[in-house]
Image (cartoon, rainbow, N blue to C red):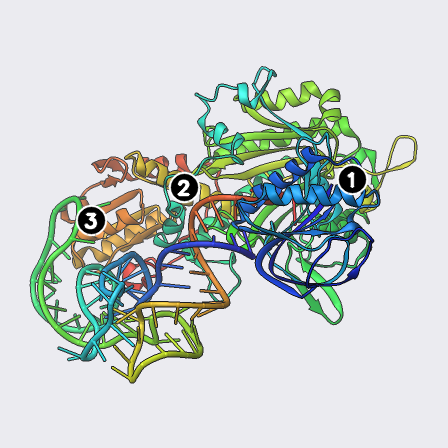
RNA sequence: GCCAAUGUAGCUCAGCCUGGCUAGAGCAUUCGCCUUGUAAGCGAAAGGUCAUGGGUUCAGAUCCCAUCAUUGGCUCCA
């Protein structure tokens, strides 16, 4: 039995004439109009029986429950199959289906008639689906209509979900003991995760505004954020850090256009895998799209390189500002899921699978280390790894090595066969306060795009070959790193720990508060002296009480406060109020600078991105 | 994209259910007073297309519809 199921605003049909002798008798062939209804076009095929009918109707009811519709029209539609059952069988099965659905408001259009019809289909993803139900199919395939072959393939792909422990053993998800791995459980059961009790926005959304980091820009499209001076400073430092680390690893930084011609031959097949998820721009007859990754630019560039196997692995890197993905509007949240985001993307062109496998290990270490240095510890994320069965059988020990590097059990998805362009992909998933998982670092082994983009190198035998390409983002989107740091801080706050950003990312590292106006000059001198040591320091020279100025510094999460009065102005040492303890301690100037430099060691520095004096600063966010 | 909730001053919110004086409060801002010792000193002023567009009504922030945005759930996540 074949079914095309449509969730409709309305359908209107008119029986015009009998098509077959045994057509259903109807008294008064009139136009029928039905609204807010699921229409199931049904073709009964040879071999279908009452079990098939029951199965089909239960599947239809199931999906109708999901979309919350209670009205069903069964519409006999022969054109779905070339292997139709006899009309008598078909009619009786159709009747059976109708009576099985008697708990719904169900009807059918007359069997055996030629009908004209007019249908208005709804626009949501579940509105259209097709089903094939046969005697032996326990569950019918349920494909979205109107999708590319790749997306269709994805929904029918067979994959196995497992948990792999660091020692290499694989366990079925149902049998795995998650009691010590709660976050992994969230990741593993993400699809079937039960409803969260809390109905609240993720904490980072309020924090990104309160700390004047970022905000929505109503004049742009959803998911396109604006970054205030504080946010730009943090983002810029993270961008620089990731870039420095990738260059140290051996990536060469390039810059490529943010828009491409969707009719360029290299683009067509890649592009058609992922329809309608990008921003499109029409310009002088060209159909351009905004890049959703750095792949295009780097591959088109590499296409022109004259490469030898001796040059490989060769690594290109770009920090995209921005990559654009037109995510579904309901999916956008704060800094977690955006339509425009900043993505470090490093491709390594490798001569063969063994070289790619060696290289992926290096990049795995790089990714782990980058996250750690950004302030995201291994305990903050869980790992997922996906690969084809063939790739697993040929590279078992390397896969186990990656899992061992992570040191904790890992979610595994094994595909029976390849259906993306890659044969292996791993990612680190951050789980936030609301139990949402989002990918940070990731790497893939791509076996298709070397060919698709015509990238070539010459091997030892002087023959041209397509490279295997790795796609690594060592940190994931920069905005997402800020999201993770804010979510972590919020989690600390819940536990009673004072929330804090890593010192090297703090917009202000030290605040100086003069007790009275007479200390302004001393404070300004001190401020200059500290600034000269590459430390971000400012002076709260507003005419407010000490208590209030300290409170506001606390609200900005500033780690060190120096209150300057007579005692301090006359002392060799600094009196430092440390936010984590709330205590004041006396430390010599040099020792204090050392303390700060130690915490920001090997991290990029940039100066204060606001006025040094608070009296000169507008209030961006309260 | 679908379903639901929310949208009132720069920010956080009250008022809406049950329509009716000039739409309120706290914080922030401005001005004045105070002159400050480790998380909010005192007073005053100014600040509002009640998201947008329609509708019902003598009268709409309040009721109805549509649109937009945010958040949650679903779906999705190259």
Q: Nearer the viewer, residue A170 or B1?
A: B1
Seen from the viewer's position, the closer of residues A66 and B51 is A66
Residue at 26% in and 46% down: A554
Q: Is residue A590 visible?
A: no
Q: Nearer the viewer, residue A91 or A236?
A: A91
Determine the residue positioned at 67% across, 56% down: A276
- Mark on residue A564? 3
Quadrant in the picture for residue A505: top left
Q: Nearer the viewer, residue A230 or A75?
A: A75
Q: State the image quarter where residue A214 is shown.
A: bottom left
Q: Which of the marked residues, 1 or 3, is nearer the chain's N terminus?
A: 1
Give the distance between the C-alpha atoms of the residues marked 2 and 1, in whole angstroms.
Answer: 37 Å
Farthest residue in the right direction?
A: A462
Could you say whether the residue bearing mark 2 is in a helix, strand or loop?
Answer: helix
Quadrant of residue A557 in the image?
A: top left
Q: Chain of mark 3?
A: A
Residue under circle 2? A487
Instruction: Say yes or no: labels 2 and 1 on the same chain.
Output: yes
Of pointers 3 and 2, the one earlier in the residue sequence: 2
Horizontal and vertical percent position of residue A603? 48, 40
Label 2: chain letter: A
Image point (82%, 34%), residue name: A309
Of the 4 image quadrants, the one containing the C terminus of chain A is bottom left
- Is residue A582 rendered to the left or right of residue A42? left
Mark 1 lies on residue: A448
Residue at mark 1: chain: A
Task: Report, in whole angstroms, how far the alpha carbon at label 3 lies from the one at label 2.
Answer: 34 Å
Q: Secondary structure at mark 1?
A: loop
For the point 78% across and 35% down, the residue is A47
């Amino acid at each position: 039995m074949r079914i095309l199921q449509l969730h409709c605003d309305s359908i209107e049909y008119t029986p015009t004439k009998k098509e077959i002798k045994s057509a259903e008798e109807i008294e008064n062939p009139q136009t029928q109009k039905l609204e807010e209804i699921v229409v199931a076009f049904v073709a009964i095929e040879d071999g279908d029986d009452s079990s098939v009918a029951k199965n089909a109707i239960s599947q239809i009811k199931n999906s109708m429950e999901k979309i919350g519709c209670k009205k069903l029209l069964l519409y006999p539609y022969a054109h779905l199959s070339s292997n139709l059952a006899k009309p008598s069988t078909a009619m009786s099965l159709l009747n059976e289906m109708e009576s099985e659905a008697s708990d719904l408001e169900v009807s059918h259009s007359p069997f055996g008639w030629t009908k004209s019809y007019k249908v208005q289909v709804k626009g949501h993803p579940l509105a259209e689906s097709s089903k094939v139900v046969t005697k032996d199919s326990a569950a019918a395939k349920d494909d979205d209509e109107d999708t590319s072959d790749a997306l269709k393939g994805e929904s029918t792909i067979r994959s196995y979900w497992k948990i792999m422990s660091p020692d290499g053993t694989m366990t079925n998800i149902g049998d795995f003991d998650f009691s010590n791995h709660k976050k992994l459980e969230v990741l593993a059961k993400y699809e079937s995760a039960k409803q969260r009790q809390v109905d609240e926005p993720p904490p980072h959304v309020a924090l990104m505004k309160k700390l004047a980091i970022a905000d929505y820009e109503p004049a742009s499209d959803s998911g396109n954020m604006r970054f205030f001076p504080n946010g730009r400073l943090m983002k810029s430092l993270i961008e620089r850090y990731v870039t420095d680390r990738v260059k140290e690893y051996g990536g060469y930084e390039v810059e490529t256009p943010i828009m491409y011609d969707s009719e360029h031959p290299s683009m067509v097949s890649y592009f058609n895998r992922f329809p309608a998820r990008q921003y499109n721009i029409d310009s002088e007859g060209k159909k351009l799209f905004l890049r959703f990754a750095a792949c295009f630019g780097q591959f088109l560039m590499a296409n022109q390189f004259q490469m030898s196997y001796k040059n490989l692995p060769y690594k290109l890197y770009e920090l995209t500002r921005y990559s654009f993905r037109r995510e579904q509007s309901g999916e956008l949240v704060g800094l977690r899921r955006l339509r425009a985001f900043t993505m470090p993307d490093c491709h390594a062109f490798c001569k063969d699978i063994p070289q790619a496998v060696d290289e992926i290990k290096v990049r795995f270490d790089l990714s782990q280390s980058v996250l750690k240095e950004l302030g995201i510890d291994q305990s903050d994320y869980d790992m997922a790894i996906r690969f084809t069965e063939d790739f697993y059988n040929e590279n078992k020990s390397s896969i186990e090595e990656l899992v061992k590097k992570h040191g904790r059990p890992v979610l595994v998805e094994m595909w029976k066969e390849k259906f993306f362009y890659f044969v292996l992909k791993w990612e680190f998933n951050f789980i936030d306060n609301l139990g949402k998982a989002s990918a940070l670092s990731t790497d893939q082994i791509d076996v298709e795009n070397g060919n698709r983009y015509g990238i070539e190198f010459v091997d030892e035998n002087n023959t041209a070959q397509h490279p295997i390409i790795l796609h690594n983002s060592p940190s994931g989107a920069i905005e997402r790193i800020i999201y993770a740091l804010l979510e972590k801080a919020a989690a600390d706050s819940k536990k009673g720990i004072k929330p804090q950003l890593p010192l090297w990312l703090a917009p202000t590292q030290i605040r100086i508060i003069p007790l009275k106006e007479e200390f302004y000059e001393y404070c300004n001198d001190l401020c200059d002296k500290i600034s000269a040591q590459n430390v971000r320091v400012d002076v709260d020279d507003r005419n407010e009480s000490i208590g209030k100025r300290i409170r506001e510094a606390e609200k900005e999460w500033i780690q060190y406060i120096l209150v300057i009065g007579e005692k301090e102005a006359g002392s060799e040492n600094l009196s430092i109020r440390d936010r984590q303890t709330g205590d004041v301690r006396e430390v010599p100037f040099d020792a204090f600078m050392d303390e700060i430099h130690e915490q920001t060691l090997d991290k990029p520095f940039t100066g204060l991105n606001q006025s040094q004096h608070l009296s000169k600063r507008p209030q961006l966010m309260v």
